Image (spheres, helix red, strand yellow):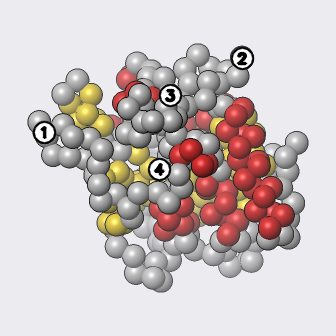
Amino acid sequence: MERNTVVQSDALTFCQSLADESVDVFWSSPPYNLEDAFRPGSGQNWKNKMRYAVPSEGARTFGDGCVKPEPVYQQEQAAVLTEWHRALRPDGVAFYNHKVRIKDGRAISPLEWIRQTPFVLIQELVWDRGASQNVDTRRFLPVSERVYVLAKQPGYKLDNANRMHDVLRIPKSPLRRAAVGHPCPTNPLVVKSCLSVVPKPTDGRRLLVVDCYGGSGTTALVAASLGMDFLLADLAEEYVSLTRGRLLHEWLMAPKQQELVVA
C-alpha cells in the first residue's frame, strides 16, 4: 500500500492487509463501543446532534456510533491489536488510546483485551482532560482516558527529550465537532505528545505511522507535521472524504515533499 494514503475499510481488514513488520508506529483511538446518544457532546442533548456517519453499503453491520455486544467488541479489539503486533517492526511502537468504561455497573479496563495479545505493555499514560460532561453523582466523575504504550519486546526506549510526564494534562480538543465534521475528533496535542517521543531512525528514513480508526484525519496531519509518513483507514466513506479534504488543504497551504494519494 502506497504511503500517505487514506482508504475506506474496517479496522481489522485494513490491518490484515499490512505487510509483516512494515509499520514503525501505530496510533489509534477506537470508538469505545458507545452509542451516539451516550457520547458526551455528540448525542441528543447536543444542539447540532452530531452523530457518527453510517457506513456505506457493503460495510460491516455495526457502525462506529452503534454499540456492539461487549464480547464482540473486545474480541475485535484484541484481533486488531494482534494484527498491529504482526505488522509492527521489531523496533516499532504502538499507542492505543482508550478509556475505562462503566457498563452494567462494572468498570471495564482495556487491559482486559490488551493482555490477550502478544504485546508487551511498556507504559500506561493518563490523559487528564480536566473536565467531564458526565454528572452521575453515584461515582467519581470520569475526566481521564488512557494511552497504552505497546512494544514487541520489554525494555523499549522512547526519546523523551522534553521530559513529559506520564500524566498528559491536555484539556478539551481545540477542534470543534461541527467545524471539523466529526462527532469525536482526536485531540492533536495528545497525538503529538506520543509521536514526538518516537526515536528517529539512524538510517534517516521517514517513519510510517498507521491509524486504522482514522476519523477526521488528525493523526495524518500530526504525522506529516513531524516529518513522518502515514496510512489511514476509516469505516465510513464520509470520513475518508473528510480526511482527504483536510489533508489536501494542508498540502496546498504548505506543500510537502511527497504528494497526498487521494485515489
Q: Label 3, on which residue? A: 65
First along the sequence among labels 2 and 1: 2
Report the Cα–Cα distance between label 3 and label 2.
Answer: 16 Å
Q: Does dot 4 land on a helix, a strand or a loop?
A: strand
| Of marks 1 and 3, the one in the foreground | 1
In the displayed structure image, the side of residue 119 where residue 104 appears, left or right? left
Compared with 18, 155 (above or below) is below
Q: Do the residues labelled 4 and 2 touch (CB within 8 Å)?
A: no
Classify residue 4 by image quadrant: bottom right
Report the Cα–Cα distance between label 4 and label 2.
Answer: 29 Å
Amino acid on which disc 2 is placed: Glu
Report the Cα–Cα distance between label 4 and label 3.
Answer: 19 Å
Q: Label 1, on which residue? A: 137
Compared with 87, 191 (above or below) is below
Residue 102: percent from left, percent from top: 25, 33
Classify residue 208 by image quadrant: bottom right
Amino acid on which disc 3 is placed: Gly
In the displayed structure image, the side of residue 4 where residue 161 appears, left or right? left
* Residue at the image position 41 percent from the left and 28 percent from the top: 44
* Residue at the image position 41 percent from the left and 57 percent from the top: 172
Q: Label 2, on which residue? A: 57
First along the sequence among labels 4 and 2: 2
